[in-house]
Image (cartoon, grey):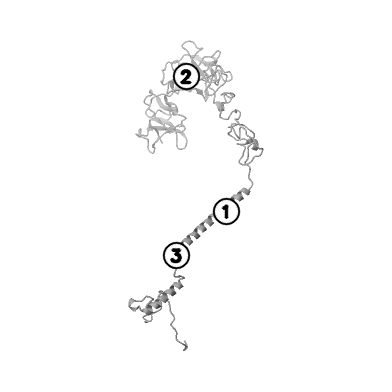
Amino acid sequence: MGGGATGPAPVFVSDGGAGPPDSAGDGGGPFTTKADTGAGDAEQDAGVDAMGDVALGLDADADTAAPADAKADGDVKAETADAKTDAADAKADALDAKADAQPEVAQPICGDGACQDPEGCGDCPQDCGPCGPSCGDAVCQDPENCQSCPADCPCAPKCGDKLCDKTAENCQTCPADCGNCPAVCGNAQCEAGESCTSCPKDCPCAPKCGDKLCDKATEDCQKCPADCGTCPGQCNVITSAGCLSGQQCYPLPAKPPMCAAPGSIGLGKPCGALADCAIGLLCIGGVCGKVCDTSGATSGYTCTSPAVCGELTYNGTPLGGNLGVCQGGATCNLVTNVGCATGLACITFATGKACVKSGAGGPGAVCQSSEDCSSTTVCVNDQTGKKTCAQKCNTATGLPKCGAGLVCQPLSQGSPPKTAPDNLGGCL
């Protein structure tokens, strides 16, 4: 500064709140030790205290006035709370006034002619009208029908609806719903479960020789003497009816049968001519066989199983009268011929085995059947498809041995092919 008069130094207040240094210049805070306190310091301290009180806005009566001020402050807070309560009451009054100003809405009354919410057809049909039809309400109303709502509108009974309505349907008018009626024989209807054998009245069988009915469209005395009787002037080729006692009726190709005296050769024995055999037998295939009726119509003229009645033909044409001879059923061995009489060969049929008169064909001879071959050979189709007689052999044992360059090969027959019995083979 300039050189003017020197006054007292400014007093600084430190950050720590210390007052100015004392006159001794010791740099301490506003607090001093007791030793440093003098009269002058007391005066100065008094001045400072006075300044501090003034700076804090206190007066000499501060201690006595404090309780009064506190009471005044409490009164002010109470008044403030009362003011807030009054404001809230005023706001509530305003809302009530606003609500009172709104017009009142009348509640709907059923029967006042107006359909208003929450009224509906269910609880007030007077105002809202009846409800529309609902499937399942047990009332059939338009547009409901038996197809759209069968629960309310049942359909009329109808054949094919899988329901048997007993008032309008039965097993005869609607078997699809009520099932088939039980078969009743004699009602002139051939029903399920009936046949010509179980109920010929309703289901007539096709004409058959032996049914004791001579069907003129298919039967006559020649074709079925069992039903139509023996032709006039002719004998019966099966029973020999129409012949003298001790005679037998024999068939003739393209001619009426004739009566003649029979031979004496017994069943299963070799023979040469048709009439060589005893009465009731015919010589077929060189062996005497039992006469039989292929239709089964003539009692007593059937074959014992496994033998069957084979129809007699001449050049492929049946001799007529249902004439046949029991064939098969033999127990002979196809390879060795054991079980057949001397001079007979064991051959196989579709129905079994039979002993027949052997032919003269040796190995390599042309044949049509095994009856054309010797007893030690069998008629086979060779590799070229030619039918020839081949030496018999047993495929299991290889006996009898085949000639040089030949092999015992297994044979089969029928369709589908079946292996021949007794291990029958041919040397090929």
Q: Which residue is mark 3?
A: 66
Q: Is residue 230 left or right of residue 388?
A: right
> Would you name the residue on which mark 2 appears?
292
Secondary structure type for disc 1:
helix
- Disc 3 + disc 2, Cβ < 8 Å: no
Alpha carbon distance from label 1 to label 2: 135 Å
Return the x and y of residue 19 as percentages of the image width and height: 41, 76
Are the residues flagged by discs 1 and 2 in contact, CB closer than 8 Å? Answer: no
- Which mark is on residue 90? 1
Farthest bottom residue?
3
Judge whether residue 130 can be spotted in this image: no
Q: Position of residue 175 (x, y in %)?
A: 56, 26
Which quadrant holds residue 304?
A: top left
Q: Secondary structure at mark 3?
A: helix
Q: Residues within 10 Å of mark 2 (few under 14, many from 20)?
A: many
Which tag is nearer the camera, tag 3 or tag 2?
Answer: 3
Could you give the CA–CA distance between mark 3 and mark 1, rounded to whole angstroms?
A: 37 Å
Amino acid beneath label 1: Ala
Compared with 279, 120 (above or below) is: below
Which one is earlier in the sequence, the residue at label 3 or at label 1?
3
